Amino acid sequence: MNLHCRFFIVYLFAIGITGVILTDSLAEASPDSTFNFPDEVDSSDVHRFVHRAMGTEFTFMLYLREGDVGRDDLAPIAQEAFDVIDALEHQISSWIAASDTSQVNKFGAEHPVEVRSDLFELFRFSATTHRETGRAFDVTVGPLIDLRREALDLGKEPAPEEVSEVLRLVGMDKVILDMETRTVFFKQQGMRVSFGGIGKGLALDKAVEVLERFGVESGLLSGGDSSMVAIGAPPGSDFWKVGINNPYNAEENLDIVRLRDQALSTSACYHHLAGQTGKPCGIFDPRTGEAVHTMMSTTVIAPSGMLTDALSTAFYVMGTQGARVYCTLHPEVRAIVVENTDDNQLTPIHIGTN
């Protein structure tokens, strides 16, 4: 699987962005990110911290706070934020047997499973977003991911009856959340949740909370090649300028996005642009189990990384009109979508006004 959509941070550095949905972990399959400082920017003004977690690299680009002398002033703060990401991974990753999520997957159909408050709020967010996106976003896709991965390994599409059977186990409407007891219960045996689609965005949100608590006012954080969150703006600028690279030509920008105290995520599938027309797109509609072919990429800008992660996938499934309806009802969200056309023309469609 090879889903490529690269972003370029015009003001500061270059970064690759990839949306990968066919995964059960918090990891993603992606090319290495590259961070290149333009000649006119003094790299000594900003400090880069990298940490591996959730199967990918988290990168913080942080400007010094007032009174800071150098990198050593920021290093302990960055490490504390990385520690929070590690703790979150051990709580929500379905690949860690002792995690709360794994315990829910193991026992959730036998009896209600009590979870910690952070994970319960993640379930509540998932249920709300599932409803508001018309079921296009769904964290109960674990069984569908398994089926699709097995079929991919065999080089074939799963049989329609196999998809229908698995879809009985998919749907947040089959998950019972009890707010009083803070428990999670599955209505169907064999159900399994995966937070791989929103884990990195949530991790970035948690990291921002730590950094801002210690007075960081300017920084750009990325989780792998699909999610980023901006803290403030670079000194002397009103925004971080993020260029979405043209997949035909990495030297050109498809579009420019301005970020300030916002998050950005993307989902994309460019197999046919790379001459890989025989490979299925790894983004699937959880309502039908089928691969989505109507879109090429969806980029979402919103107040939080968890929300942009969820919506970039959901909008890819919902299509342009569905994204329009959502953004009309939620003016804090905007999107840039590129539809899949017969002539492979890349025409960004802007949705939302914030």
Image: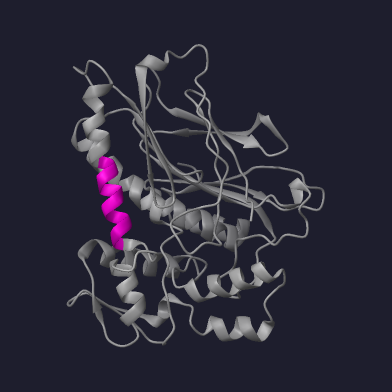
The magenta stretch spans residue 82: yes
Left or right side of 131 for 98: left
The quarter of the image holding the C terminus is: top left
Q: Total marks drawn?
A: 0
Tell me the quarter of the picture where residue 116 sits.
bottom left
Residue 235 can be seen, yes or no: no
The magenta stretch spans residue 151: no
Left or right side of 245 for 59: left
Left or right side of 320 for 304: left
Between residue 315 and residue 123, name the one nearer to us: 123
Which residue is at a point 44% across and 83% down the rendered structure image?
Answer: 190
Residue 346, above or below 289 = above
Residue 92 can be seen, yes or no: yes
Whole-percent x, y for residue 188 in the image:
41, 87
Between residue 30 and residue 236, name the one nearer to us: 30
The quarter of the image holding the N terminus is: bottom right
Whole-percent x, y for residue 109 in the image:
35, 85
Residue 302, above or below 153 = above
Which residue is at a point 43% across and 50% down the rendered structure image?
Answer: 331
- The segment highlighted magenta reads 81-91
Whole-percent x, y for residue 245 in the image:
62, 35
Which residue is at a point 19% across and 33% down the rendered structure image?
Answer: 214
Residue 318, above or below 289 = above
Q: Magenta stretch mostly in which secondary structure?
A: helix
Left or right side of 271 for 319: left
Tell me the quarter of the picture where residue 89 sits.
bottom left
Tell me the quarter of the picture where residue 158 sits.
bottom right
